[in-house]
Image (cartoon, helix red, strand yellow):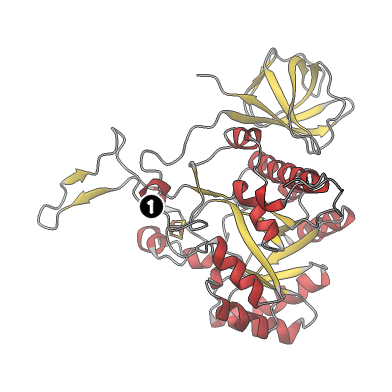
Amino acid sequence: MVQSFPQPPLTLPELLAPAGSLEKLRVAVHYGADAVYLAGKQHSLRARAVNFSEHELRQGVDYAHNHGVKVYAALNIFAHNNDLDELASSLAFLAAARVDACIVADPGVIRLAKQRVPAMPLHLSTQANVTNLEHARFWEEQGLHRLNLARELSLQEIEAIRAAVDCELEVFVHGALCISYSGRCLLSSYFTSRDANQGDCAQPCRYSYALVEEKRPGQYFPVIEDERGTYIFNSRDLCLLRHLPALVQAGVNSLKIEGRMKSVGYVGAVVHLYRQALLWIRAQVSAGANLHSLVLPQEFFAELETIGTRGYTENFFQGSPDAGDTLHQASRLAQSHVPVGLVRQAEPLFIETRHMLAVGDEVECLVPGRFQPLSARVAAMEDEKGQAQERAHAGRLLRIQLDPEIAELSPHSLLRKKLTG
Ligand code: SF4
């Protein structure tokens, strides 16, 4: 029932975004992340993300802190003995660089961190697979400041863990899923010698598979879903957008978006969507609505279609997933829009192109603090020497004129266009 008196402002959980590079960090901050997670060149579970040099990491921390945003650094490998000296140096460097917490999974790394950087808050990585409240209590007793809960939990299990511990809880709300427990999988090691548990997964779960009978080597029996075969281990992507009110009510402290390997366009669009959804929830509650009965409007879900995806699943949030939670027909689904440019300068307007762009194209601009994108037509483009351009490939720096002009654009804003055909 809607109450007639205003409520005190709702405290929202932190929105935690992936920052696979300095540029992605700035875009995540631009679109409303409260915190970002990143990694140096070693020791994280994303060895092939661009990741940060020491100089870039210091720059990233300064930039984030100047915008009131926290930075967490991933040190979540399962270490071997010969990693330990370098890990000790990394911990000292991260403390000196003023990161706000380290993300860890290996008890040995946790012990080392407590010895070498005792004041550093430690966040338990999803790699540690916290699936029950005794497991959560154990890590709380070890002094962990925050636990990222396993993606294999239901809402009821999250609520029970919340009631059992006082430390912060973090939940993945959006992004790619493993078909194993959060990366604890040897598929990539077998097929490509790239170790998922050292951050180097080649994602062979996304390959197209066929069946071979032992006595008929070389005879591949197609497992037919359609003419392209089937992708039997290709999980759909996680999306808990619909359950944000329940997660806020459950007292989760941080909502994490997966994707340090994803593009800058993806990071900006997903952070923008979740920030707008959280602001909408707070506005509704301030106007007297009950949190537990809130239903996000359809526009939020329409916006999801503009972002590249394998289709979406809510995974274990309301019960075990079934065959419908795997995308069998293809490795990915087609997306309706594609990022075409990143604003480098607003006045005059310079963008770096990320896709083919031509004069006459209709573009949409994602503006922080505003849910609906603003539309405009590309009226003219010229290169850095002032030469008029009719069309441009990705990777160009162009001065462009939009019709109508969009005053709200600023550096790090994204432009996208609808894909045709
Ligand atoms: S192969 Fe797939 S399931 Fe295995 S670790 Fe890599 S992404 Fe996860």
Vertical side of 18 occupied by 347: above or below: above
The answer to which of 46 and 82 lies nearer the viewer is 46
Where residue 296 sits, quadrant-wise, is top right
Is the CB atom of the residue marked by disc 1 within 8 angstroms of ligand 1's nearest atom? no
Where residue 381 sits, quadrant-wise, is top right
Residue 295 is situated, as x and y percent measured from the top left of the image, at 64, 43
Is residue 271 shown to the viewer in this render?
yes
Kindly identify the residue that appears in the image at 41 percent across and 60 percent down: 188
The answer to which of 54 and 106 lies nearer the viewer is 106
Q: Amino acid at mark 1?
A: Asp
The answer to which of 142 and 346 lies nearer the viewer is 142
> Would you say 215 lies left or right of 127 here?
left
Kindly identify the residue that appears in the image at 52 percent across and 67 percent down: 198
Q: Badge 1, how many Cα within 10 Å: few under 14, some, many 20+?
A: few
Is residue 18 shown to the viewer in this render?
no
Residue 86 is situated, as x and y percent measured from the top left of the image, at 65, 76
Q: Residue furthest left?
A: 215
Kindly identify the residue that appears in the image at 46 percent across and 39 percent down: 332
Question: Can you tell me which quadrant of the image ligand 1 is in?
Answer: bottom left
Residue 339 is situated, as x and y percent measured from the top left of the image, at 65, 32
Q: Mark 1 = which residue? A: 322
Vertical side of 40 occupied by 401: above or below: above
Residue 78 is situated, as x and y percent measured from the top left of the image, at 54, 74
> Would you say 171 lies left or right of 116 here?
left
